Amino acid sequence: MLALLLALALSLTLRRMPDSEGARLWALAFLPLAAGLVLQQVEVDATLVLVLRDPLVLAGFALLLAGLRQVLQLPRIWLLSGSIVLASLVASFFFTTVWPLPELRQALRLTGVTLLCLGCVTVLRELREPLARRVGLFLQGVFATLVMLTVLRLALLLPERSPFLAALEGTARVVQAALLLAALLGLVLLLAARMNVTLVRLVVRDPLTGVLNRRGLDEAAHTTLGFARRVGRPVGLLLCEPDPLAAGNERQGAAQGDEVLGHFAALLDRQFEGADLAGRLGGGQFAVLLPGAGPEEALQAAETLREDFAAQPLLVGGEPVSLSVSIGVVSLPATELAWAGLLAHADVALHEAKACGRNACVLSRSPREPEALPPPDPAGVQP
Amino acid sequence: MNGAEALRGLGLGLVLVVIVAGMLLQVLARTVPAPGAGWWARACALAAPAIVLAGLAPYTPGPGSAGLRLLGEALMLLSLGALAEGLLRFGGRGGAWGAAVAATLLYLAAAAVLPQTGALPAGGLACAALALGWAAVALSAFFSFSALAPADRGPGRALLGIAATAAVAALAWGLRAHGLIDPEGPTSPARLPQAALLVLAVTFVACGLLAALLLSAVSLRLAEQLRRESIRDSLTGALDRRGFEQHTARLAALAAQLGQSVVVLMIDIDRFREINERHGRAVGDLALKSLAQLVQRAKRETDAFARLGGEEFCVVLPGTDVPGARVFADRLRRSFEAFEIDTGRSFLNCTISIGVAYASASTLVARELDLVDLLRQADEALDEAKRAGRNRVRFFASAEVMSSRLDSRLFTSTIPHPEP
């Protein structure tokens, strides 16, 4: 009972969370639940209260089910819940005033609870989002345990009361309270999981370097390529991968790799602005989208980028280490523009660049004949 | 229920709450990127056996009892340490775990030695240690609270709640310790026989409350992040001001780079305030949503559509010329005029006024006009459209628009402001 009272107080936090129409129903659910359970323990004489006792408890469960259906955006929110509560009102009235049979009344109440919890379990199967599935499983477990518990209590009703059974009944009640708390918290968790799903979809920047991440690039490329296709202009793509530092440096760790990436991202930020898009595809790969650039312009931009990157050495342990980057270049005319196609061609060109000694820009002319243009390498940076 | 039964009941309830909270927090840690949630789950995993052991200790005979009790208390202290560590990690710091392990070892040493000397009864020491543990939890929650950005009000309140709850628990255990250590004081077992029950009840409530507050802290932080990152207006699905600024700056630059012109439309629902007052806010919202749907259907994928204010919308059409802009604006105006909104009691016909501004590719490339200027021009054209009687389209009369073969009745009558 204590648990229920505090859960009631905590349901107020649900009000603060966005997108929580179903959650308001859950917050409401604990009011009738707590009231009904309190009335179970306390002896009351007023007939009205006696009649309302059971339906109140069932109304609490019904609100949980209805809230679940609303959050999962299923139709006919109130069908099962409403009908059970109404039936229980009628039955409770009948069995309290007209034909008093407390055991039957209790059995009916427990059956109602079982049905509603079963409803929750089946409804939760509709939860499809992969990220929220674990929460769905947790909630299904909670409600399934509640079902088993109420079935157990149903079974305990029938034989005559012995002290052991009474203790068992008491334990069952405590467990039920804990499970209800779990249900409420699990529902809050469900909302949190959904928010997380939405958030993942919104975040378009890479947390480490601050440039666009894969998702941001995909979305921006979609608009850019669509527009370029419509107005008949080509689009160029540079696929860049900073080369690993000289093999002799044994102490190269993740932190240094991150520093190189940050360095490169800062350079990209400075050099490409306005309509040109620069972002991190993942791992060590960056992509630069150049709308309106034909093959020569794209290659020129790649060369400038490569030279600028090599011109700024990085301080490692007090010693300047010169950096280099391999770039795969591709430019497709408006008629052939596709994001996947651009990436694929540029990937082939990048492999070429890595293969012929790094610190190079390779322009892809067609899938079959990449044209390599390795620049002179006076410093002999790579071993 | 007599005392022993109540104690057992509460103990059982406590174990259940902790187990449930543990499972919940474990799921949380796996589902949502929440720093510290894993530690909270570990805290529950440590606390559950601790409580069981402490509960079983009175029933086992001989030296095993003391050993079990010590183990239980040690586990409990470690669990509180894990809780504190998780709270610190939530606020972006860490480092309490080492201190927690050290404190537990210290406690074990003290517990082994001190009762022999008779300076402190074992029970008193245990309760004092637990009180300190809870105090540490309260401190870490408060620490994390102070580390949060001031904009994060939601998680801040949850953290304060956690600190308060832990402080109350610390107080309860501290009083119990005081009672056990000082037999003459007001809180001793002789004066207050239900002391054990009370302390357990407070801990029970505190654990339940903590589970919910921890969950709230993570959820509320997610909600704040979501609010910060969102770029769409929730009612209409159009971009909001922030998303608009991000998207259209790039769009204008893109148009310039590809040698294309840009058209900007400012759209305003006529007499919106009257509609809201006479038919209610729901109808007003319906009008906004209908307009948004019409524009979404009419625009191309590469056009940007945003809601800039209460009833003001903006559409940016890259790659459109003046005749194209006129066709688009006219079509939009006419289809919204023809659209009937169901107010429940009657059907309502609303109208819109549209102001249009145009910049050719050469103007954009030469940087003579940028998007901000275009927005201002479109705004002036919108004002003109309203003044001229509403439910009409007006073009801003820039040189390029006037030189196109557009019907001069559509121009704004005001002369464009000279550039400063």
Image (cartoon, rainbow, N blue to C red):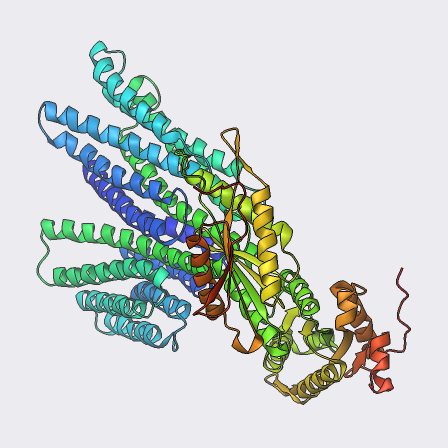
The image quadrant of residue B123 is top left
The image quadrant of residue B312 is bottom right
Pick out the residue farthest to the bottom. Answer: B338
Residue A305 location, x and y as percent? 59, 52
Q: Identify the residue at image location x=31%, y=63%.
A: A57
Front residue of this view, candidates A100 and A226: A226
Residue B181 location, x and y as percent? 30, 18
Against B22, residue B172 (above or below) is: above
The image quadrant of residue A85 is bottom left
Against A194, residue A84 (above or below) is: below
Front residue of this view, candidates B28 and A9: B28
Classify residue B299 as left or right of residue A158.
right
Classify residue B148 as left or right of residue B341.
left
Q: Is residue A202 in view?
A: no
Classify residue B375 as left or right of residue B199.
right
Pick out the residue farthest to the top. Answer: B117
Front residue of this view, candidates B75 and A8: B75
The total of numbered circles placed on residues is: 0
Against B273, residue A254 (above or below) is: above
Q: Is residue B201 in view?
A: yes
Front residue of this view, candidates B309 and B415: B415
Residue A55 location, x and y as percent? 32, 67
Q: Identify the residue at image location x=44%, y=44%.
A: A244
Residue B175 location, x and y as percent? 36, 26
Quadrant (top left/top right/bottom left/bottom right) for the C terminus of chain A: top left
